[in-house]
Amino acid sequence: MVYIAEKPALAKSSDELRVLIPGWGVDLDPTVRPSVPRERFDLDTGAHWEFPERQPERWPRERSLEHKFLTPVFGTSCPPRGLSGLIRRHAYERYSEGHTAHWLLLVAGDRVDAWGNHVRSLFTLRPDNPITQTGVLSELACNGWAARFGTRRADRRHQWLDPLIVAGPWLLAGRYAVRAARRRRARRAPAAR
């Protein structure tokens, strides 16, 4: 079991493992092991518990399939919420950490959360500014041309994609906003006559 003060007991004895695995136990003699002076489990650690107190769980937390339970203390600053929370929860409930789908779903959840925050910022007094916050202006002001093309950068192959990835979603959102405004105006025009 994980998260206990003492070293857990081995599943099989040394003799059983020596029979099963060729060469097992060659480092059992303390005289040939360099870590023996430091590897001690009989020292007083100062811990006053066998298993630490568990932090209360206010909402169901994400937990990998590989783990039996959550760690005794876990982060609560960013609780999963909305569609991104559903995507993350699905990644943890359905896929092991060894599967690519698990990590791709977590990345997708992060992207959905980022876009949700971008949309929410439009309804505040200080909306996001994609021009200044993405660093595009620094490309012109801080010798960006020489930094991109004067060196052997590893990301040169996909540099042409960067403007599409950064500006593309904003342009699409603007296009849909203009289209929605036109539809709204067209609906109001016949009612005004």
Image: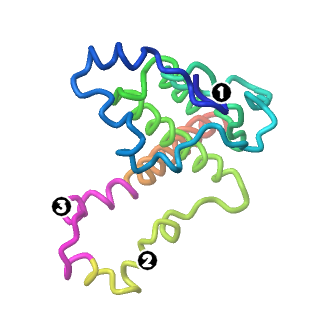
Of helix, strand and loop, which mostly describes the magenta segment? helix
Q: Which residue is mark 1?
A: 61
Which kind of residue does numbered mark 3 sit on? Arg
Q: Which residue is mark 2?
A: 137
Residue at (35% x, 13% y) in the render: 16
Which kind of residue does numbered mark 2 sit on? Leu
The CA span between labels 1 and 2 is 40 Å
Q: Which residue is mark 3?
A: 157
Q: Are marks 1 and 2 in contact (CB under 8 Å)?
A: no
Residue 189 horizontal/vertical position (percent): 60, 40
Which kind of residue does numbered mark 1 sit on? Arg
Please, is residue 103 above or below residue 123 in the view? above
In the image, taking residue 98 as reference, residue 77 lies left or right, namely right
Residue 22 horizontal/vertical position (percent): 21, 23
Please, is residue 56 above or below residue 171 in the view? above
Quadrant the N terminus occupies: top right
Which one is earlier in the sequence, the residue at label 1 or at label 2? 1
The residue range painted magenta reads 148-166
The CA span between labels 3 and 2 is 21 Å
